[in-house]
Image (cartoon, helix red, strand yellow):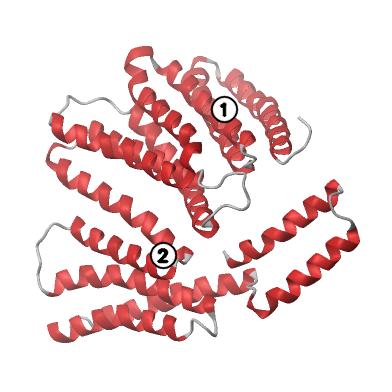
Amino acid sequence: MVESRERGWERLLARWTEAGVLDAESAARIRAFELERAGPTRLRWPMLIALAFGALTLGAGVLLFVSAHWDALSPQARFAVVVLLVAVFHVAGAATERRFPGMATALHAVGTVALGAGIFLAGQIFNLDEHWPGGLLLWAIGAALAWALLGSWPQTALTAILVPAWLSSEWYVATTERWSSNGFRVIACGIFLLALAYFTALNQDPDQDHVILRRTLAWLGGIWLLPAALALAFGTDAYRDAETLSIGLRAVGWMVALGLPLVVAIALRRAAAWPNALATLWVVVLVNLRPVSGDASVYAWWAAGATALAIWGVSESRSERINLGSAIFAATVMTFYFSHVMDKLGRSASLIGLGLLFLAGGSAIERLRRRLVHQARGGAS
């Protein structure tokens, strides 16, 4: 994230030079000033990869060492090890903060991950047979406190992952004896909308507040959104069981699944969160569309949603939304062909149709995607 933040001015400088706002001499002076000012604190990609890999292997090695000697330790020694696992990484991160901020960030991240292991190991040590999602809640609270104190992007990512994980586990436990496709549908809708809120955290304004937070959430949402969309598609495709959940439990589940992502979007985008509200309505229609209009309408609704995501990207100059919208649209067309067209044709005709779909359809979607990306980046429409 440090590299991304410091490289942002170079992209803007190149854009301004190409547009004629700055001449080459002025651009060279600005570049020399920024490079001199950045000095040795800039992190290159190899260093970032080394830090991430080092943090992962260090944490895995420590946990492997502890697990290998776990049975030989007394309960008191086990608890001491658990406390040390959490404390030593955060203390080491604080000690290296001034000399090597990147190392400090990695060590603090390992410390927060170790907190989760410590919480569940403590439960095992003292044979606590309690409400297990409470462990995720404590872990999420610890990550949120670390984020509030440190403000680093790994703590942001951990908090953004652990809070919905806790809510999902609470819903699973509350409905485990009456679990059905309807219960899964609530989680699928909530996870999809929250991933979309994360993914759209960035807008077209380069001078927005908390840019590291927003970029972290956008990356997390981009990684999360396609699996979440797949889960939502399976959730709406699943057979609707007879409703086994109480009215009150269903109301709470849908209130959190639909309301929490909208609250997050409003906190991130404020008045510009109205497309997220439309996305919430889109999901509500999607989960109720198949029993009313049949399968074809569901595919058309997915295609409409993918198109809306691409248009959203054009309106806010965000090419990643255009790319993801194009991918979802292509996946929708392919799924419709395999599900409703291919089995109605002969073997040769189905293969010919599949080839034409890949060649002609893929080419058309790619040309349109490139045109929309060019338009989003300020080119002529």
Q: Which mark is residue 307?
A: 1
Residue mark closest to the camera, 1 vs 2:
2
Residue 50 falls in which quadrant of the image? Answer: bottom right
Q: Residue at x 55, y 56 (%)?
A: 211
Residue 74 visible = no
Screen quadrant of the C terminus: top right
Q: CA distance from mark 1 to mark 2?
A: 33 Å
Number of residues whose C-alpha sits closer than 10 Å to that of mark 2, classed few (under 14), some (14–19) or many (20 or more): many
Q: Which mark is residue 82?
A: none
Identify the secondary structure beneath mark 1: helix
Residue 27 visible = yes
Which residue corresponds to mark 2? 155
Q: Residue at x 78, y 50 (%)?
A: 15
Position of residue 313 in the picture relative to residue 36 (left or right): left
Pinpoint residue 217: horizontal percent, then vertical percent: 48, 52
Pinpoint residue 79: horizontal percent, then vertical percent: 18, 81
Identify the secondary structure beneath mark 2: helix
User: In the displayed structure, would residue 315 be above or below residue 18?
Assistant: above
Q: Amino acid at mark 1?
A: Thr
Mark closer to the chain start, 1 or 2: 2
Number of residues whose C-alpha sits closer than 10 Å to that of mark 1, classed few (under 14), some (14–19) or many (20 or more): some
Question: Who is closer to the viewer here, 318 or 292?
Answer: 318
Q: Residue at x 48, y 26 (%)?
A: 302
Pinpoint residue 7: horizontal percent, then vertical percent: 68, 62
Screen quadrant of the N terminus: bottom right
Q: Amino acid at mark 2?
A: Gln
Residue 12 falls in which quadrant of the image? Answer: bottom right
Label 1 with label 2: CB-CB less than 8 Å: no
Q: Residue at x 58, y 21 (%)?
A: 350
Pinpoint residue 182: horizontal percent, then vertical percent: 24, 31
Position of residue 84 in the picture relative to residue 339 (left or right): left
